[in-house]
Amino acid sequence: MNNKQEKSAVILAGTEMFDYLKEKVGERKTRTEAYCDLLDKALAGFVSPFLRKQDCELRPGQCHVTISDLAAEWHWHRATVRSFLDTLESLGQLERTRLTKSVIITMSLQSDRSPEDGDVQDQPDLATRLQEALSDWITDNASAEETGKACGQLVHRALAEIGLQDIYPPDSMRVDLSMSARNDDKRLVDIRTTALENIALAAMQRMLRKSRFDDCLDILDFFRLDLGGDWAAFIETSKDIVELILNPESTIDMDEEEYPLKSLRKPFLSLVARAQEAAN
C-alpha cells in the first residue's frame, strides 16, 4: 500500500525483542546483530581490552570501543563499520565522542517508565546534551557548522522519541502566517525553543569569554572613588550598565560626567566574564 503522507513513529522494543530477531548467517554479523551488539555493550558499560588502561569514566548507556575491534568482531571492513555508525547516528540511534584511536558510543536508551507526552521537563538530558555540544564552540574549538550538525541531531532525536518531525518549508514555498510556530504542536515548539535558547546562551558565553582578559581596574576605581564603596549603589549602577549593553539606544537618567557609564561597559563585561570563568 502506497502512503503519500508518511508519518514518523517511534517503536518501543526491549532487548528481548532484538534477541528474537537475530539470525545467525555464518560468521559475518547482520546489521541487526551489529546493532544488538552495540546495545549489549552500552548496557554493560563495555570497554575494549585495548583501552582498559585509559582513564575514561563512562555514563550509563555508553561503551568505549575501537573501529578495528568492531570490524574484527563483526567480520566487517573498517569502512563498513564507520558507515554503519554514521547511519545510526543520523537516525538518532547513537552519539559518538571521537577520541584519538577510539570512540565512545552513547546509545539512545529509554527506561521502562513510559514517558509523558512531550513535556520537555521530562527530558532533563536534552538541555545538558545541547550544552555539551555547544561547549567546544564557546571555547572556539569547534566550528559553527560542526556544532550546528550536532545540535540538529539532538533535536531530531528528541522529536523522534515522541513521534514528531521538524519539517521546514522548501525555499520555493511562500511563507505565510499559517506556518507560524503558534500553529505547531506544543511539544515540537518546546523542544525547538529549548535548543534555540541554549544556542543563544552559548553565543552570549562565547562573547563574554573574549572579554575575560580585558582590564577591569577602571570599574574597581569607579566603585571605590565615585561610589565610595556603596554596594547598593553599585548594584543599581550594574543594572543600568547592563541596560546600556543590551540596548545601546537606552537613555539613562544620570549625569554623564559623574557616572560615565558608557566608558564602563568594557571593564564591566570583563568582570562578568571572569565570574563566568570561575563558575565553570
Image (cartoon, grey):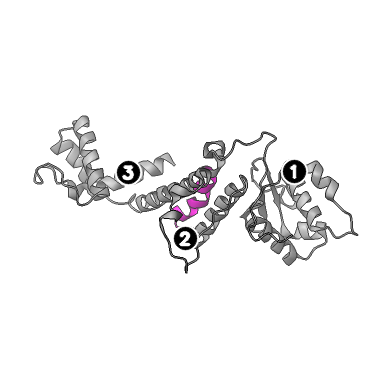
Q: Which mark is residue 272?
A: 3
Residue type at tag 3? Val
Q: Is 233 situated left or right of 24 in this image? A: left
Question: Which residue is drawn at the image coordinates 80% and 47% (left, top)?
Answer: 18
Give coordinates of residue 267: x percent, y percent: 25, 47
* Dot placed on the residue nearer the N-terminal end, 3 or 1: 1
Give coordinates of residue 244: x percent, y percent: 22, 47
What residue would you read off at disc 1?
13
Give coordinates of residue 212: x percent, y percent: 34, 49
The C terminus lies in quadrant: top left
Chain part drawn in magenta = 128-144
Q: Is 26 situated left or right of 255 in this image? A: right
Q: What element carries label 2?
A: helix
Query: Of 135 and 213, which appears nearest the observer?
Result: 135
**Mark 3 crowd level (few <14, some 14–19, many ≥20, 10 Å Cα):** some
Query: Of 143 and 217, which appears nearest the observer?
Result: 143
Q: How far apart are marks 2 and 1 (CA)?
A: 36 Å
Residue 8 to residue 59: above or below: below
Q: Is 266 situated left or right of 258 in this image? A: right
Per the image, is 181 magenta?
no
Give coordinates of residue 116: x percent, y percent: 60, 35
Q: How far apart are marks 3 and 2 (CA)?
A: 24 Å
Question: Which residue is drawn at the image coordinates 56% and 51% (left, top)?
Answer: 154
* Dot placed on the residue nearer the N-terminal end, 3 or 2: 2
What residue would you read off at disc 2?
144
